[in-house]
């Protein structure tokens, strides 16, 4: 952190050296002469010397605590050079002389001492001890120095200190945060880079983000998105992305600069991959709000997002697919996303089994795109999404299975597509998943089966899976009608049976009506005292949120099963 000159040459020039006024410094004390001689010896054998303990440290400390500014310079430069190559956990015996040197009025001493402290602040143990010993206050004073080198090193040290959670709260409550925002405007790119890096480190907790917003960090960070320095762009984009996690801050971002979305979209086209990635993530967080979901599309953000989504670089793919998932939540964005050409690439990402997060975002986006338009559902089905899900779902992780079964349930709401979905043999994977160890997978799979069971012309696909795979459709219904089941699961089971009965397929109705476990389970539900037990059942089965009396439904189905059993 900062350039350092040779320590040994500095020490050799200490004797009788004139100061900058032309006057001679005071004569050296005997202990100072001894310390210089010892230090020169240790420096000549530096590869075998531990400067943080014993005689080497005592020699350095003697020079550091000297009244002779030249000796202080030598000590500071020695500490800087040593810590450039040897960083380890140290004690207060090492830190105290460096912190003392920080209080010097000599710029060279300040610069070298802050560089040494910054080097040591790489180690977690040192980060805490530096702050405990009052190093933060010393660094805050150095941040106000008119010397750019001192500023740069002091801010760099705070950047390192701010990576430790215990230090962040202290930094946030000190004057350091305001000074970091001011120094982020520095004309010196090194100071700017260190200041924005420190601000980024402060954005990982909500309370610290709020302190940053309160001292005016947002407009400064936005203004630096156009910096020619890729590191500054990265730090600012990432900091803004973290700030945008909070709903209140998203409103303040909107008030700060109306072109923020345009700036971030432009950064997705920059040469730096890490900046592209963070720009997409920032847009993802902004797109938690409806306003930004629409604005990103309106500002032509889909094309660069599609390019990133097709990238072979995982971070780019992940950031872009996460962003498009949020954007796809708004119904008005469904058709523009499809027309931009996202459907096939999203389906390809379903096979990205090295990263379940990519798979989850991709299938969730496809489900969102199918949410409100028959036309869009048809496009997605024709692109082969059901076949791809059928191929992958059995071996997928539960988080992916949740999203995939939910997507099928949404697609199965379309009366025009149900028979087509059934022809893909999707029931062969849905039925076993109704006994998954994951309750959401069970529920979504059952809801998809229920949606597929309503108003279809050919019920033979249901007959084909009656007894297998696994325990078949029969096992699913018995499982969901069990007394121990959640009432919403029981509702799906009873409602699905009603669809089978209304479909009036003789073979399927006979299979259901002649299964004693099913008939008895429905009968038990029907005979319960349902007074005062009406519940709102929210399920995809039937396509609506049903506010229904499950007991009345069960009585209706139980009677129909008795009649069917007589035939």
Image (tube, helix red, strand yellow):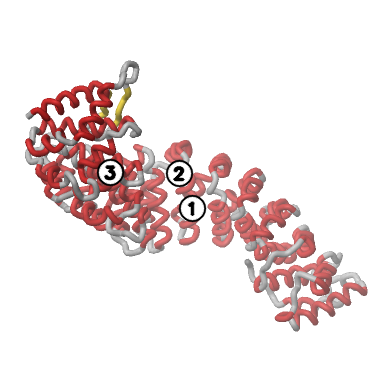
Q: Do the residues labelled 2 and 1 touch (CB within 8 Å)?
A: no
Displayed quadrant of residue 276: bottom left
The residue that appears at 58% across and 41% down in the rendered structure is 211
Q: Do the residues labelled 3 and 2 touch (CB within 8 Å)?
A: no
Question: Going from the N terminus, do you reach mark 3 or mark 1 first?
Answer: 1
Question: Going from the N terminus, do you reach mark 3 or mark 2 first?
Answer: 2
Distance Cα–Cα, label 2 vs label 1: 12 Å
Placement of the C terminus among the 4 image quadrants = top left
The residue that appears at 25% across and 44% down in the rendered structure is 407
For label 3, the crowd category at 10 Å Cα-Cα, with few meaning under 14, some 14 to 19 and many 20 or more, is many
Residue labelled with disc 1: 236
What x and y, as percent, mark residue 514? Answer: 15, 35
Nearest to the observer: residue 482 or residue 548: 482
Question: Going from the N terminus, do you reach mark 2 or mark 1 first?
Answer: 1
Please state which of the two labelled residues, at mark 3 or mark 2, is closer to the viewer.
3
What x and y, as percent, mark residue 106? Answer: 76, 63
For label 1, the crowd category at 10 Å Cα-Cα, with few meaning under 14, some 14 to 19 and many 20 or more, is many
Q: Quick check: 553 above or below 81?
A: above
Residue labelled with disc 3: 434
Q: What element carries label 2?
A: loop
Nearest to the observer: residue 433 or residue 105: 433
Distance Cα–Cα, label 3 vs label 1: 47 Å
- Number of residue marks: 3
For residue 244, the mark is 2
Please state which of the two labelled residues, at mark 3 or mark 1, is closer to the viewer.
3
For residue 322, the mark is none
Q: Does the rendering let one see residue 467?
A: yes
What x and y, as percent, mark residue 463? Answer: 12, 43
């Amino acid at each position: 952190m900062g350039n350092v000159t040779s320590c040994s040459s500095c020490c050799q020039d200490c004797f009788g050296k004139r100061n900058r006024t032309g006057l001679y410094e005071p004569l050296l004390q005997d202990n100072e002469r001894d310390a210089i001689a010892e230090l020169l010896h240790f420096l000549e054998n530096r590869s075998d010397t531990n400067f943080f303990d014993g005689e080497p440290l005592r020699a350095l400390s003697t020079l550091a605590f000297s009244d002779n500014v030249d000796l202080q310079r030598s000590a500071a430069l020695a500490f800087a050079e040593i810590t450039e190559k040897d960083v380890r956990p140290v004690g207060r015996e090492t830190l105290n002389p460096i912190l003392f040197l920080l209080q010097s009025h000599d710029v060279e001493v300040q610069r070298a001492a802050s560089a040494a402290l910054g080097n040591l602040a790489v180690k977690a143990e040192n980060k805490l001890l530096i702050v405990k010993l009052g190093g933060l206050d010393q660094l805050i004073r150095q941040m106000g120095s008119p010397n750019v080198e001192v500023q740069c090193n002091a801010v760099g040290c705070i950047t390192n200190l701010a990576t430790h959670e215990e230090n962040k709260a202290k930094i946030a409550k000190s004057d350091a945060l305001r000074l970091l925002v001011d120094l982020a405007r520095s004309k010196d790119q090194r100071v700017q880079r260190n200041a924005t890096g420190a601000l980024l480190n402060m954005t990982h907790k909500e309370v610290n983000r709020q302190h940053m917003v309160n001292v005016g960090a947002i407009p400064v960070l936005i203004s630096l998105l156009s910096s020619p320095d890729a590191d500054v762009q990265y730090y600012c984009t990432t900091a803004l992305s973290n700030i945008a996690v909070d709903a209140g801050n998203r409103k303040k971002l909107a008030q700060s600069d109306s072109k923020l979305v345009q700036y971030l979209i432009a950064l997705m086209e920059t040469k730096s991959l890490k900046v592209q990635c963070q720009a997409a993530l920032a847009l993802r967080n902004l797109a938690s709000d409806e306003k930004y979901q629409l604005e990103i599309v309106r500002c032509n953000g889909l094309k660069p997002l599609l390019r990133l989504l097709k990238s072979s670089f995982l971070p780019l793919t992940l950031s872009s697919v996460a962003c498009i998932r949020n954007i796809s939540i708004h119904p008005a964005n469904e058709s523009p996303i499809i027309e931009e050409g996202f459907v096939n690439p999203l389906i390809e990402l379903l096979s990205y089994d090295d990263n379940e997060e990519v798979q989850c975002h991709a299938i969730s986006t496809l489900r969102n795109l199918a949410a409100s338009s028959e036309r869009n559902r048809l496009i997605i089905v024709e692109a082969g999404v059901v076949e791809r899900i059928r191929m992958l779902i059995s071996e997928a992780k539960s988080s992916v299975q949740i999203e995939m079964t939910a997507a099928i349930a949404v697609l199965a709401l379309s009366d025009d597509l149900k028979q087509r979905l059934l022809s893909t043999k999707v029931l062969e994977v849905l039925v076993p998943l109704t006994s998954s160890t994951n309750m959401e997978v069970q529920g979504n799979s059952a809801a998809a089966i229920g949606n597929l069971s309503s108003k279809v012309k050919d019920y033979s696909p249901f007959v084909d899976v009656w007894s297998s795979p696994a325990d078949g459709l029969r096992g699913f219904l018995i499982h969901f009608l069990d007394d121990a089941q959640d009432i919403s699961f029981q509702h799906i089971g009873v409602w699905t049976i009603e669809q089978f009965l209304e479909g009036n397929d003789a073979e399927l109705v006979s299979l259901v009506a002649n299964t004693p476990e099913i008939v008895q389970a429905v009968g038990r539900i029907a005979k319960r005292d349902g007074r005062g037990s009406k519940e709102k059942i929210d399920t995809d089965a039937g396509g609506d949120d049903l506010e229904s009396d499950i007991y009345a439904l069960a009585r209706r189905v139980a009677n129909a099963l008795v009649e069917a059993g007589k035939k």
